[in-house]
Amino acid sequence: MNFEQHIQPFLSYFHQHPFLGELLTFIIAFAESLPIIGTVVPGSVTMTFIGILAGTGSLSIPLTFSMAVAGAYVGDCVGFGFGHHYQDKIKTMWPFNKHAHWFDKGRYFIEQHGAKSILIGRFFGPIRSTVPMIAGILHMRWIVFLLAAIPACILWAILYMGPGIVLGNVAMEIPKAV
């Protein structure tokens, strides 16, 4: 069984139901941005696969890209709001109470880089989902956070979906015999 036989059912399904593919894109980008949940969601692999679907024409590239950016942005805002609302109480909640060093590292990282930490943190899997929350705990101003999160989410979507879009597009151009 070759690669085409594995991916063809997905291509057909999402070509017939593009809304579900775009909704899935939003959900994955959102979940990957949430504290704790984001550490177990395989966002990079999944977003590349979604890029392949978009590159083959099964999903609209502009709409799928927009859904990825929106999902990541909303997820970051939820994490930031969670940290802003619960403040130091988070340190007593599971699983944070078992990993206090996360806060120390996150605090140091944000204090060193300020708003840039939102952009930088978006590209490091283990801290991607906790940087917005810790920024909220540290009382980063909402406007600063929101303005830093926008380019971070756009760049993230480009870098994580881009290779898949190119791969899907190239795969459609190569004759089946090759």
Image: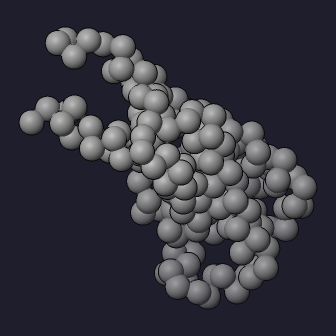
Above or below: residue 88 compared with residue 39: below
Return the x and y of residue 122 as percentages of the image width and height.
Answer: 62, 47
Q: In which quarter of the image is residue 66?
A: top right
Residue depicted at x 63% and y 55% = 71
Furthest-front residue in this view? 16
Is residue 52 rendered to the left or right of residue 37?
A: left
Residue 108 lies in quadrant: bottom right
User: Which quarter of the image is occupied by the C terminus?
Assistant: top left
**Please, is residue 130 above or below residue 20 in the view?**
below
Res. 99 in view: yes
User: Which residue appears at 87% of the width and 61% of the height?
Assistant: 142
**Residue 105: image x %, image y %?**
61, 61
**Is the N terminus in the top left, top right, bottom left or bottom right quadrant?**
top left
Residue name at image x 52 percent, y 29 percent:
162
Q: Looking at the picture, tell me which residue is in the foreground, 84 or 50.
A: 50
Q: Where is residue 7 in the image (x, y as percent from the top left)?
A: 27, 39
Task: Please tell me how many numbered marks the rendered image carries.
Answer: 0
